[in-house]
Amino acid sequence: MVKKIGILTGGGDCPGLNAVIRGVVKSAILRHGWEVIGIKDGFDGLLTLNNAIPLTLEAVRGILPRGGTILGTTNRGNPFSYPLRQSDGSYIQTDISDQVIENARNLGIDALIAVGGEGSLKIALQLSQKGLPVVGVPKTIDNDLDKTDVTFGYNTALETATDALDKLHTTAESHHRVMILEVMGRYAGWIALESGIAGGADVILIPEIPFELEKICTSIKERKDRGGNFSIIVAAEGAFPTGGDRVVAEGATERYTIERLGGVGQFVAKQIEKCLDMDVRVTVLGHLQRGGSPTTFDRALGSRFGVRAVELVEQGDFGKMVALQGRKIVAVPIADATRELKQVNPDGEIVRAAESLGIMMGR
Ligand code: F6P
């Protein structure tokens, strides 16, 4: 018999997290009469017992349109390989998962709802395999989680990127320039691809299709010959040239084990300036894509995910993640959803549609 559940948000934040939290709290309290506590700052909140807050109906009132997460989050620190600081200032990766599970039990929760991307859900899966009853909710603006058609947060990020492209169009046209917009997307180019189509880009560069600089120049020159005296390029941060590497802004360290990407826009600009007689300017959209109020779509999806996650807890269906397939919210094993990233198919319908629209895909 479930009486009390916990919820945490892990990984990079995204719009719609508060809609999920609210959906969980409202349905847990109103439908089931359970108590809900929020764990602060992702799995880090389970390192001690004083990082939990009661989530009442009052606590979630008014949060639906708010970006970010009222619980806080972190995209560093995996309890199975946690960077523990030593007295000499160095870090040692230590497995502290037993302590995390014990703390969850001591908080008196019968189940944990973990809202996160691929990294956080892999941690959730490992904790569930060690006996903690866990249900996952998929989140990421990158939309690269498998077994769900989309993750919440992605739609809002797309709106932001498309709006930026609309704005870049007007200034590009006035100055006859090439404008490059660098968007997020570490391993998957969904944001670049769909905002590029929606925003009328001329070139889209994604991690799934290594790009050829000479071909980019040729396509911009050809467009100019056809009377298009400006061009718009959208580049996912994880895009890279054939035979080259992703552009890293900051390498991984002992403490932050994931490298920070950034700079592909500048890289492409420097190269194509050599072969084009046009000004090139770069805009890095960065964390604007992760901020702001969620779109209607993300609010509704986040709310439905939250409600369904509570239903899975009630059914004792643990180790599962809620997912959108077609128009239905379903439950899939977290193991299946985190086995492989959902990348853009370079020969799939969306890329073919882009190419049929005359968009150059870097190849
Ligand atoms: O995974 C989402 C994401 O937005 C990536 O696209 C990006 O590389 C990363 O987060 C940036 O994270 P941080 O907030 O650590 O800069």
Image (cartoon, grey):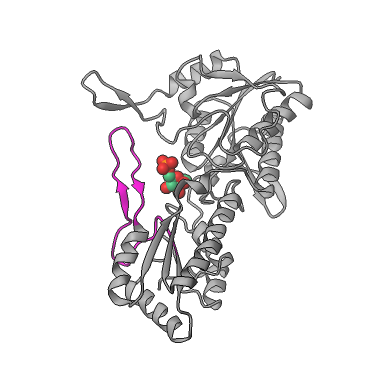
Residue that appears at 48% across and 66% down: 171
Principal SS element in the magenta part?
Answer: loop
Quadrant (top left/top right/bottom left/bottom right) for the C terminus: bottom left
Residue 137 image offset from top left, x and y in percent: 60, 38
Q: Can you name the residue that lies furthest to the front here? A: 174
Q: In this view, does 45 lie above or below 345?
A: above
Side (left or right) of 29 relative to 323: right
Rendered residue at 56%/37% (across/down):
68
Give whichever of 6, 131 is nearer the camera. 6
The image quarter in which residue 74 lies: top left
- Residue 135 in the figure: left or right of residue 244: right
Residue farthest toward the left in the current orientation of the protein: 88
Q: Is residue 285 a member of the stretch shown in magenta?
A: no
Q: Does the magenta stretch include residue 256?
A: yes
Q: Where is residue 100 in the image (x, y as percent from the top left)?
A: 47, 21
Q: What residue is rendered at 30% in x and 76% in y?
A: 275
Q: Where does residue 344 sit, x and y in percent of width and height?
A: 50, 61
Where is the N terminus found, in terms of image quarters? top right
Q: Measuring 33% from the left and 56% from the top, which residue is drawn there?
A: 246
Q: Where is residue 334 in the image (x, y as percent from the top left)?
A: 55, 40
Q: Can residue 147 be seen in this view?
A: no
Of the pair 322 and 301, the residue shown nearer to us: 301
Farthest residue toward the right?
A: 31
All told, the count of numbered labels is: 0
| Residue segment shown in magenta | 234-263
Q: Quadrant of ligand 1?
A: top left
Q: Can residue 95 be seen in this view?
A: yes
Q: Is residue 110 above or below residue 200?
A: above
